[in-house]
Image (tube, grey):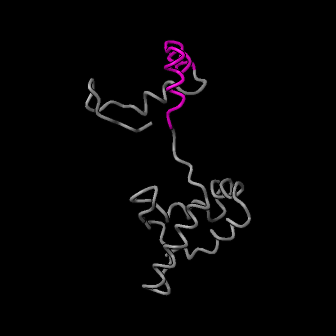
């Protein structure tokens, strides 16, 4: 919803907010959708919207490669929460945060872990994490 882009009518049009206001079951969204044609609704619904959910396998492959690289430089390296790295999906992926929110006893971590496979959990837990 935070995406902003230049258009012919606005140099900082809030495109993400425009899409958000036309998605979901809220009264405002339904009212906005009612003013669109069927063709416009089809195009709107086809737009990729929301946060990209990164498959755990993709993240783990990238993390394990990063650990191998970093451990070549320093055999005792541990990934800090602040660790950022370039990946195929982001030039500045917050890798340390990705690991952090999947570790520990916090409610959020446990909810995310509940949706991961046993093999993925084992790999997350094996990552050298923490300062």
Magenta span: 27-48
Query: Which residue shows up at 56% across the image and 64% down it?
Result: 99
- Horizontal side of 87 relative to 26 (left or right) equals left
- Number of numbered discs: 0
User: Left of 41 or right of it: where is 17?
Assistant: left
Where is the N terminus found, in terms of image quarters? top left
Residue drawn 74% across and 65% down?
118
Give the quarter of the image for residue 56: bottom right
Residue at the right extreme? 118
Between residue 129 and residue 35, name the one nearer to us. Answer: 35
Residue 101 placement (x, y as % from top left): 57, 59
Task: Residue lying at the far bottom in this picture: please name it.
Answer: 75
- Residue 95 position within the rendered picture, expressed as x and y whole percent measured from the top left: 49, 63
Q: In this view, does 24 lie to the left or right of 118?
A: left
Instruction: Please name the residue shown 51% across and 44% down the image.
Output: 51
Q: Position of residue 90 (x, y in %)?
A: 43, 56
- The one of 48 and 26 positioned closer to us in this rendering: 48
Closer-to-camera residue (112/11): 11
Q: Does the magenta stretch include residue 49?
A: no
Residue 109: x, y in percent?
63, 58
């Amino acid at each position: 919803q935070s995406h902003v882009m230049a258009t012919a009518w606005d140099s900082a049009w809030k495109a993400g907010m425009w899409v958000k206001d036309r998605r979901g079951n809220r009264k405002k969204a339904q009212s906005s959708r009612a003013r669109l044609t069927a063709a416009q609704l089809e195009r709107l619904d086809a737009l990729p919207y929301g946060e990209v959910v990164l498959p755990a396998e993709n993240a783990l492959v990238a993390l394990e490669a990063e650990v191998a690289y970093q451990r070549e430089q320093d055999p005792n390296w541990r990934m800090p929460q602040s660790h950022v790295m370039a990946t195929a999906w982001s030039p500045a992926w917050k890798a340390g945060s990705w690991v952090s929110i999947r570790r520990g006893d916090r409610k959020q971590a446990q909810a995310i872990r509940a949706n991961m496979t046993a093999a993925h959990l084992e790999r997350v837990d094996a990552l050298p994490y923490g300062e």
